[in-house]
């Protein structure tokens, strides 16, 4: 049987860090972050990276381990995070996967094989061709070799069209067939999965707004200013994160600092809605629903209790805190 891991997920600002730390303390675990932006170094404030005080001595992996100048992918995350999980398991401890990047979590649990990382030169050539001939022509080209994938894409979906053409050119296998093959592979890990949210959506939004206000007070604008001084630009993936792209505009004089803060709040709320939509697809999730203020200690006891008592076949139920 695959080894068992715990997952603590949920939309932004729902208290995942605190719950994850307390769960790790309860079960003898270590945290493996599943946050696509906390992986970057030099980006502490805007990614809400946990501080040493917040981690309470619990080891955290996959945080601040990548240069913000580097591109990063789900395939690379799976390779590196699975190595962390396997090391934790080899030492008799429990991996506690904590974060809100659903793609990373799903891929890590599945042990999903990704199509070859590809050729940057080929990708650039296909991207330039897309820009030259247009999306309709490139989608028609994709339909000739992979009609199944093409039928799911819009002509404006430049990234996925280019990726599908790249995979076929490099491997001779369509992206749709590769996905089917990957889905037949048994999961790498068994998991108990928990998602945090609020009973009232407004409570979540209010918490997001307070978090943004706190980030601004802690110096998020100075953090962005420093990153720009190091040579990062708006085109770097790391700088396209919510909180950074808005302040890049503010520092360029395109909008005010006050407007940037409001834009960050709005985009964070929208992101939380997208995260909830993603999570609702997973029928095996155990929802922990905060009725007002989060209670990480109570949630950790519940999660640890299910981990110890039910093992790999927990009952599906929802708890309110």
Image (cartoon, rainbow, N blue to C red):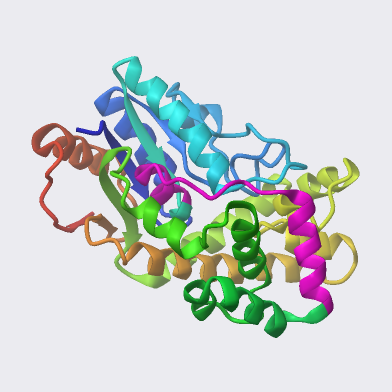
- Quadrant of residue 275 within the rendered picture: bottom left
| In the image, residue 282 lies in the stretch drawn in magenta | no
Say whether residue 213 is left or right of residue 320: right
| In the image, residue 129 lies in the stretch drawn in magenta | yes
Residue at 45%, 46% in the rendered image: 99
Up/down of 249 relative to 6, above or below = below
Up/down of 320 relative to 22, above or below = below
- Quadrant of residue 267 within the rendered picture: bottom right
Residue at 53%, 66% in the rendered image: 271
Q: Position of residue 211 (x, y in %)?
A: 56, 55
The N terminus, quarter of image: top left
The C terminus, quarter of image: bottom left
Up/down of 281 relative to 98, above or below = below
In the image, 16 versus 86, the foreground residue is 86
- Can residue 11 be seen here? no
Residue at 57%, 57% in the rendered image: 172
Q: Position of residue 64 (x, y in %)?
A: 63, 34
Name the dominant secondary structure of the magenta segment. helix
Which residue range is magenta in the image? 104-132
Q: Position of residue 143 (x, y in %)?
A: 57, 78
């Amino acid at each position: 049987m695959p080894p068992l891991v715990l997952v603590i997920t949920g939309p932004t600002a729902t208290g995942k860090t605190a719950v994850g730390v307390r769960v790790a303390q309860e079960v003898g675990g270590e945290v493996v972050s599943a946050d696509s932006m906390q992986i970057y170094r030099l980006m502490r404030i805007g990614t809400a990276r946990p501080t040493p005080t917040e981690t309470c001595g619990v080891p955290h992996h996959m945080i601040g381990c990548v240069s913000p100048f580097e591109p990063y992918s789900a395939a690379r995350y799976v390779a590196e995070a699975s190595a962390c999980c396997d090391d934790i398991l080899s030492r008799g401890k429990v991996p506690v996967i904590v974060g809100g990047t659903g793609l990373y979590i799903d891929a890590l649990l599945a042990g999903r094989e990704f199509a070859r990382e590809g050729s940057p030169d080929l990708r650039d050539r296909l991207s330039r061709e897309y820009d030259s001939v247009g999306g309709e022509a490139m989608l028609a080209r994709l339909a000739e070799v992979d009609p199944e994938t093409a039928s799911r894409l819009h002509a404006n979906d430049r990234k996925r069209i280019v990726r599908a053409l790249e995979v076929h050119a490099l491997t001779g296998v369509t992206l749709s067939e590769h996905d089917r093959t990957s889905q037949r592979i048994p999961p790498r890990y068994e998991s108990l999965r928990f998602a945090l949210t609020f009973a009232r959506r407004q409570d979540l939004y209010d918490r997001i707004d307070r978090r943004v206000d706190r980030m601004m007070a802690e110096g998020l604008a100075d953090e962005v200013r420093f990153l720009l001084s190091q040579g990062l630009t708006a085109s770097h993936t790391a700088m396209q994160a919510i909180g950074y792209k808005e302040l890049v505009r503010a520092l360029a004089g395109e909008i005010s600092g006050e407007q940037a803060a409001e834009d960050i709040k709005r985009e964070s709320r929208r992101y939380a809605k997208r995260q909830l939509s993603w999570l609702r697809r997973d029928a095996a999730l155990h929802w922990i629903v905060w009725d007002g203020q989060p209670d990480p200690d109570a949630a950790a006891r519940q999660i640890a209790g299910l981990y110890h008592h039910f093992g790999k076949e927990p009952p599906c139920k929802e708890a309110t805190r």
